[in-house]
Amino acid sequence: MKKKRKQNQNQRSSKKQDELTIKDSLNSDIFKQLHDKKKELEKAEVERNEKEKQKKLEEKRIREKNKSFEELLNKSNMNWEKFK
């Protein structure tokens, strides 16, 4: 009986050692700094994507605003030959 208990305990302890993560091996302060940096970088990425999206929308708006009459006419679905 005692042998089996010891074997089970040894197996459990070896599993715990195998399950060590980076968080366990790093100092808690360093882990917190890394975690904060990750959040900061994710936030910066979201902001950058939002700025790119706004820039594209602004460029599209400006192109639409500056279209010539010919471009507007070509884009139109109406058949202008009917009106001749």
Image: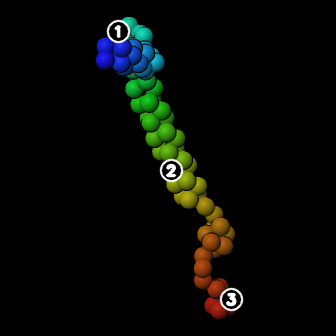
Q: Is residue 26 above or below residue 62?
A: above
Quadrant of the snapshot with the C terminus: bottom right
Identify residue type, mark 2. Leu
Depth check: give the residue in front, 3 or 62: 3
Q: Is residue 67 above or below residue 26?
A: below
Local SS, label 2: helix
Quadrant of the snapshot with the N terminus: top left
Local SS, label 1: helix
Depth check: give the residue in front, 72 or 6: 6
Closer to the observer: label 2 or label 1? 1
Q: CA distance from mark 1 to mark 3?
A: 75 Å
Mark 2 or mark 1, which has the lower sequence index?
A: 1
Q: CA distance from mark 2 to mark 3?
A: 34 Å
Local SS, label 3: helix
Pointer 3: what residue? 81
Q: Residues within 10 Å of mark 1 (few under 14, many from 20)?
A: few
Identify residue type, mark 3. Glu
> Which numbered tag is attached to residue 29?
1
Is residue 1 visible in the rendered image? The answer is yes
